[in-house]
Amino acid sequence: MIVRIPCHDGQQDGRFRCRRASREARAAIALDGFGERIEEHRRELHVHCYRMLGSFDEAEDLVQETFLRAWRRRDTLRSDTGLRAWLYRIATNACLDHLRAQPREPQPRSAPVLADPAVDPPASDAVPWLQPYPDVLLDAADAVIERETIELAFLIAIQHLPPRQRAVLILRDVLGWSAQETAESLELTVAAVKSALQRARPTVKEHLPARRLEWTAPAEPTPEERTTLQRYIDAIEQADPGALAGVLRADVWQAMPPQPIWILGREAFVAAWTPAMVGPEAWGDWRMLATRANRQPAAAAYLRKAGESGHRPSWLAVLRVEDGLVTQITTYGEDVFPRFGLPAAL
């Protein structure tokens, strides 16, 4: 087992701290079976930290911090607690410490660059730090990762909660912990946990899409989602604005985190995309690969510009589908391709 300890730039003693952390990590490996035992929980702890933070990259750092704290506090592990619950407690508090040190909250959206005037904007504010999570890694987690607890709409909604309320909601409603277990983990009273949960649930509901509470979606893509994704892919590859319009709902909107740029409405979206697909200013020839992120259909786009021999990574779109139409598109840059295991070129 290799415990990777991140070095944080900008700290005067960062190099010394990383050397010290590495020594402690190596000592943890040498301890009889301890490193291997905690390593078994790496992926599910990463998912947990990701829910708390909304950032794939920050979750990586916080898992390392969790392992380091676990090594330092290994004498506090009780047989009646269990290793998994003990690690979750450490990870949750590590995330809370991180959020206290680097506070942030969703920001009101600026005006869209293009919008259909008859379409109402989404209820949620912008969460620029939100990153996608590849399904191939979700499948590797030890725990069952249900779609409604990992999809982008849910993650955006819970980022509107204060960190402690967010932790309570995740421990109680996502992980299914009792009020007593949650209180012990967060060093709160049971009454405080119940109060936090009562305040958190209405806030989350307020920031979820209107129909989000009407369904419980399976982890696997539905036939409807597969068909819709393929129609979306075909429209892009064939450079067909009409086909693209046919796969979008009238009130579709697109966000492009971490950029504040967004587009509201089907007509606006197609108008923005048409010059990139057809005409003298077309970007080039598109090829798309189907994938999955956050238990949602996604497509990775590759572009071959004029004079180039191959298609290079361009962007990845995560789709929200309702009734066979795309209702939301969250687009990320090509920097996310490696974690999805996508090819470097086509």
Image (cartoon, grey):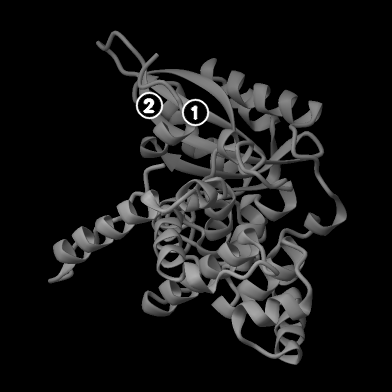
Can residue 121 be seen? no
Q: Which residue is mark 1?
A: 300
Pick the front one: 83 or 204: 83
Residue 295 falls left or right of residue 137 = right
Few, some or many residues within 10 Å of mark 1 (<14, 14–19, 20+):
many
Secondary element type, mark 2: strand
**Sequence-wise, which precedes: disc 2 or disc 1?**
1
Residue located 45% across and 21% down the image: 278
Residue 204 percent location from the top left of the image: 70, 70
**Can you tell which quarter of the image residue 22 is in?**
bottom left
Q: Is residue 118 above or below residue 335?
A: below
For label 2, count other residues whose C-alpha is less than 10 Å away and answer few (under 14), some (14-19) or many (20+).
many
Identity, as a three-letter code, of the amino acid under mark 1: Ala
Marks 2/1 in contact by CB < 8 Å: the verdict is yes
The quadrant of the rendering that contains the N terminus is top left
Where is residue 148 shown, x and y percent of the image?
A: 74, 52
Image quadrant in which the C terminus is located: top left
Q: Residue at x 67, y 75 (%)?
A: 168
Q: CA distance from mark 2 to mark 1?
A: 8 Å
